[in-house]
Amino acid sequence: MVFAILPFIVIAPPLVYVLLSLWCGRSYFDRKKEEVAKTLPSVTILKPVKGMDAESFAIFASFCTQDYPCFQMVFAVASASDPVVPVIKRLMSEFPAVDMELVVDERIYGPNYKVCNLINAFPKARHDLIIVCDSDIRVGKNYLKEVCSSFSDPQVGLVTSLYRTTGVMGAASAIEAMGFTSEMVPNVMVALRLEGLSFALGASMAVRREALEKIGGFRALVDYLADDYQLGNKIHRAGYRLVLSDYYVESILHRESMKNILSRQLRWARTMRVSRPGGYFASGITQPFPAALIALCLSGFSAAGLAAAAILYGCRSLVAIIYSRSFVGDRIFPRWLWLLPLRDLFAFSTWALSFLGNRVSWRGHLFRLLPGGRIEEDR
């Protein structure tokens, strides 16, 4: 009898977590949405950039066409020879009505070079609401309206946004994109419901100048790799309220090798391991792939083991489809559903590998992770 129910005991933690994520997601996305505020604050968008790709101009242009009364854009690069500089100058030429500046400054303040760019650009920010977006993020024309409305509450110090990918090119990019839908967004929903929002997502972060200065400005983040997590967490601990915006921004993925994707995912995994060690270690029991595999092996691939694995992945697949079609709107599932077990294997592998080293590769540099999430360049 015990042998027969053992596979079902093994799959219980990830199964419960899958169902919990569905409940949390439905509670969040079915709630009454906030109305756009009638009075919208002026805002400065800071864009730290390095390098470019074929879609850089279109991505940057999406910020220039905002339906918003007053905003400024400040691009920051470290070198005048960076290939993105002509793209920015073309942008300035084609959108002369947009208040736009380019800061070229090579000064370094710490190992996080993206944050160094932000420090160099910040003196040009003229408004009290600051938005930081990754360089590969594209937005719609109502982005600023949606994100900035929450600042009508003076207790709100930061607003962050979920992100998705609707344009998938090949199986490799699908494996990365479905991580947003089947892992990142559900995990945020569970965290939001159970403990509240205490971190930010780097795709889009809007922060009140007053709150930013209270934590020591961008200089307080320059020694960390997960500057987004640290920004949100420091503002949360400073006593401000963090808000998750209903508005999805679009993360643009390109055709890449699995090696590059693994390197990026491993960097994220190791960064979260040192930033939230207890919670990250505990997340291992919610991994569905090892649970299904263990259930099958312990049962000797008996009918009970097969039934347990089928129940787990039946629920996992159903919840992934609901998130994709109803909550996220990326429509990755069910088209790429056949890759879900492989995605789960990939996620478990990066989780396990994250404990086997403290080095990460980021934009051509090798860094060593230190306790608490700090980094130093590994020369």
Image: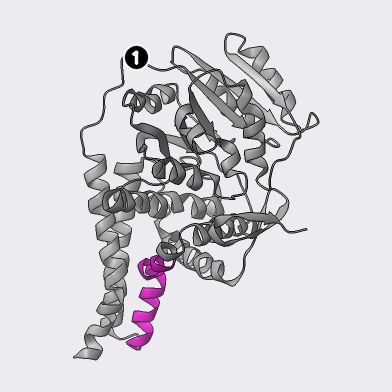
Residue 240 pos. (x, y %): 37, 37
Residue 176 pos. (x, y %): 51, 53
Q: Is residue 26 visible?
A: yes
Q: Main secondary structure of the magenta part?
A: helix
Q: Where, quadrant-wise, is the N terminus in this rendering?
A: bottom left
Is residue 242 depicted above or below 371 in this figure? above
Nearest to the observer: residue 306 or residue 14 = 14
Nearest to the observer: residue 76 or residue 143 = 76
Q: Mark 1 highlights which residue?
A: 39
Residue lying at the far top in this picture: please name it: 97
Nearest to the observer: residue 282 or residue 277 = 277
Residue 132 pos. (x, y %): 53, 32
Nearest to the observer: residue 51 or residue 175 = 51
Which region shows up in magenta? 281-300
Is residue 377 depicted above or below 61 in this figure? below
Q: Amino acid at mark 1?
A: Thr
